[in-house]
Image (cartoon, helix red, strand yellow):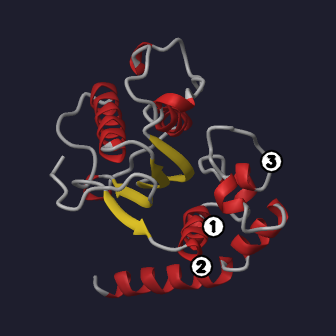
Amino acid sequence: MPHRIIPFAIGEYYHLYNRGLEKQNLFTSNREFSRFIEAIFYYQIQNPKPKFSMRNGPKMFPVDESKKIVDILCYCLMPNHFHLLVRQIQKGGISEFMRKLSESTTKYRNIKYNRQGPLFQGAFKAVHIETDEQLIHVSRYIHLNPLVAFIVKDLKFYPWSSYLEYIALRNNPAVKKEMILSFFKSPKYYEKFVLDQASYGKELEMIKHAAIDAEF
C-alpha cells in the first residue's frame, strides 16, 4: 500500500472508500458481503485473536473497547466499492485497519477464485471530516448509495450498510452511531434527513450515467 504523506490524526473522523480493480465487483454473493462486514469489525481491534480465517464460522466477535484502533460510525458495501466513516483512536490505526482489511479480503478472493494480483483499485481514498455538518452529510451520502444507484427502492431492504442501525431496525453495538444521532431528536428524524435527499441523489446518478453513455 503506497505511503501517505499526511498522517491520520487521533480523534479525527475520515471517510474511507475504494473500488474493485478496473471496476470489477468486490462482492458477488451474500457470503462475501457478510464476510467483509465481519472483517470490518474484526480488524478494528489491534492484534485480534483468533486469526480471522480460523474463526469458527460466520459471526461477529465481541469488541474489546480497550484494544480498538478505530471506531466504525457508518459503512455501506456496494457490489464494486465500499464506503466507511471512521474515527482514528490510536496512532496509525486507520492505516493498520485498512491494510489488514484489504489484505484479508484480497487473499480470500484470490484463493476462492484461483486468481492472483490486487483486488482493489490502488490505495484506499480518504477525506478528512472537518465539521459536524460535514460529518452528518457524509453519513447521509454513504447510506444513500444503494438507493441512488437503483439497487433498492427502499433502504430498509438493503442489509449491507449501517443504515438499519441508525433507524433502529437492527442492533449492532459495534456501530458507533451515537455521535451522529446526537444531532437528531430520534432515529425517525435521521431517517427523514437521509430520505429528503433521495430524489436529488437519483437525479445526479442518472445525469452521471447519461454523460458516461454519451462518451461511447
Q: Is residue 113 above or below residue 163?
A: above
- First-in-chain label (1 vs 2): 1
> What residue is at 57 percent from the left and 23 percent from the top?
61
Instruction: Identify the residue under disc 3.
Output: 169
Mark 1 and mark 2 in contact? Answer it, CB < 8 Å.
yes
- First-in-chain label (3 vs 2): 3
Label 1, label 3: how far apart the Cα atoms are? 17 Å
Tell whether 90 sits left or right of 148.
Answer: left
Percent coordinates x, y for residue 69 in the rendering: 42, 38
Mark 1 and mark 3 in contact? Answer it, CB < 8 Å.
no
Three-letter amino acid code at the position of disc 2: Lys
Q: Which quadrant holds residue 107?
A: top left
> What residue is at 56 percent from the left and 37 percent from the top?
30
Q: Which quadrant holds residue 200?
A: bottom right
- Of tags 3 and 2, which is closer to the observer? 3
Instruction: Identify the residue under disc 1.
Output: 147
Mark 3 and mark 2 in contact? Answer it, CB < 8 Å.
no
Instruction: Identify the residue under disc 2.
Output: 202
Three-letter amino acid code at the position of disc 1: Leu
> What residue is at 37 percent from the left and 82 percent from the top?
213
Residue 192 is marked as none
